[in-house]
Amino acid sequence: MLQIDLWKRILIWGIVAAGLLLAAPNAFYSKVESYNDAVAVGQPGEGWVDWLPSGLVNLGLDLRGGAHLLAEVQVEDVYAARMKGLWPEVRNRLRDARSTVGTIRLQEGPEDELRVRVSNADAVGEAASIVRDIARPVTSLTGAGQSDIVVRTQGDLIIVSLSEAERLATDDRTVRQSLEIIRRRIDEVGTREPTIQRQGADRILIQVPGIGSASELKDIIGTTAQLTFQPVVRRTSDESAVAGPGNELLPSLDEEGQFYVLEDTPVVTGDELVDAQPSFDQNGRPAVSFRFNPAGARKFGDYTANNIGNPFAIVLDSEVISAPVIQSHIPGGSGIITGNFSVEESTNLAVLLRAGALPAGLEFLEERTIGPELGADSIQAGKIACIVAGIAVLVFMFLSYGLFGIFANIALVLNVGLIFGLLSMIGATLTLPGIAGIVLTIGMAVDANVLVFERIREELKSAKGPARAIEQGYERALSAIVDANITTFIIALILFVLGSGPVRGFSITLGIGIITSVFTAIWVTRLLIVTWFDRARPKKIEV
């Protein structure tokens, strides 16, 4: 007999109700979005009921508008930084062996090399061996067993550079670190569903929906935010002043025409910061307060204790933003950065410092701003496509199958609701290809019903009763329905695994649409027909 157990009926309608409830917030998109934004910053949300779901289908760059950047990571910057960081250790090792190698002096040379001259040329080989003891194994699978530095001699010079294996490992590490820091910076300012992914060896693709322009996005992520605290050698107004080996000449950010000669080996770096927050100084001017980790706090405290009365430069991206004189020992590892900041600038600086410094600079190879009006046009075109496709399918099913076609149409409408419910639940991003996947699903959703209804017609011709015909129609069409949808689902899965960006968006909506359409065709439509049949008890039916 044609029958569905009560618990199955409750489960089917429960799934449908849950799906529609999850999809409901999308009908009030702007209100729910404002509510979510308020909740995210810890404020009471308004315009939406707290106990209702508030998940939304995020709109992609092509629907919402936003900014697109393609950045190249300047991995060579890291080589120079590594050589600068290596100098204090090399200097200390060679000073301990001064009786043998003589005096040492840092020499000018390429940025990715460290050149040290020893006064005793006969001991240069021994000095090179001492420096080689600093070498560490390369921390990568491809460079296993190799050293991170290469030490060679040239006359009385010791030349230190990174090995090829270490350069490759450094390049990969730098790009990965840049990727993570860019993601953290964008997350800090509350943008929705950004696309941040690696392209090739040293490039990063960044797409952020809902942001005003590409230049605004560059302001957020383009600043390297390399913060260092360096000893001041002297102050000068001569732009061409010679800094000397081991020093560097940097301009003052606030004082026009003023420059500082600094020791280029920092005492503490921004890598040792654990927190940075916008604040105000004792005069009520915007500033940034900071706090170091224990290691940084110890170095910062020791230096301030031993250098009271000396100036100490705070450097951000090769500009001196402040050079206060150390008045007293500063224990605890906390302090404040002052300058001619606006409130917005101090907030942005705190965000950059909190997210971490980019290990290398970025060169923007491609930048594009997609206006929200283009996104609105895309959404409108997608709506029209869905409506036209939906109406065409609804009319066709009604004309072809009459009352049974109406049951299939009800299931189709519920199917679209379930798709949006699942997309909202997983926080998926909808793009134009995603809309194409939904439109395709609308067309495919009735295929299963067509197979079932045609099979019921065949069963009715064999003079079986209507109840038996309906039951046999569903049972015998099931294998064809499953086979057709499994093959399509496998294709969607392959597109998701091998594709990226728009292709993935299409595969997600297509895969979800296949799942919901099979559910509505096999269970929802059947339940509607069984419920009608139980009440009407027709002696014969027409499909």
Image: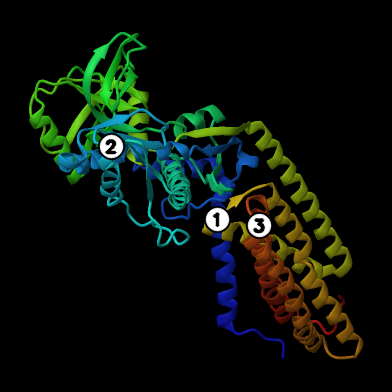
Residue that numbered label 3 is attached to:
499
Q: How far across and down, in percent of the image, does residue 389 sit?
A: 80, 53
Q: Residue at x 39, y 37 (%)?
A: 113
- For residue 384, side relative to residue 270 (left or right): right
* Above or below for 372 versus 238: below
Residue 273 is at least partly visible in this image: no
Give amino acid for label 3.
Gly
Q: Position of residue 146 (x, y in %)?
A: 41, 58
Q: Is residue 436 visible?
A: yes
Q: Quadrant of the C terminus?
A: bottom right
x, y (%) of residue 203?
55, 43
Q: Amino acid at mark 1?
A: Ser
Discs 2/3, front: 2
Tell me the element at label 1. helix
Name the residue carrying label 2.
Answer: 121
Q: Residue furthest right?
A: 461
Indicate the secondary structure of the residue bearing disc 3: loop
Query: Earlier along the polypeptide chain: callout 1 or callout 2?
Result: 2
Q: Give me the disc on residue 424.
A: 1
Q: Amino acid at mark 2?
A: Ala
Q: Is residue 493 left or right of residue 113?
A: right
278 or 533: nearer the eye?
278
Q: Classify 10 Å Cα crowding around label 2: few (below 14), some (14-19), many (20 and above).
A: some
Which residue shows up at 25% across the image and 20% down it? 322
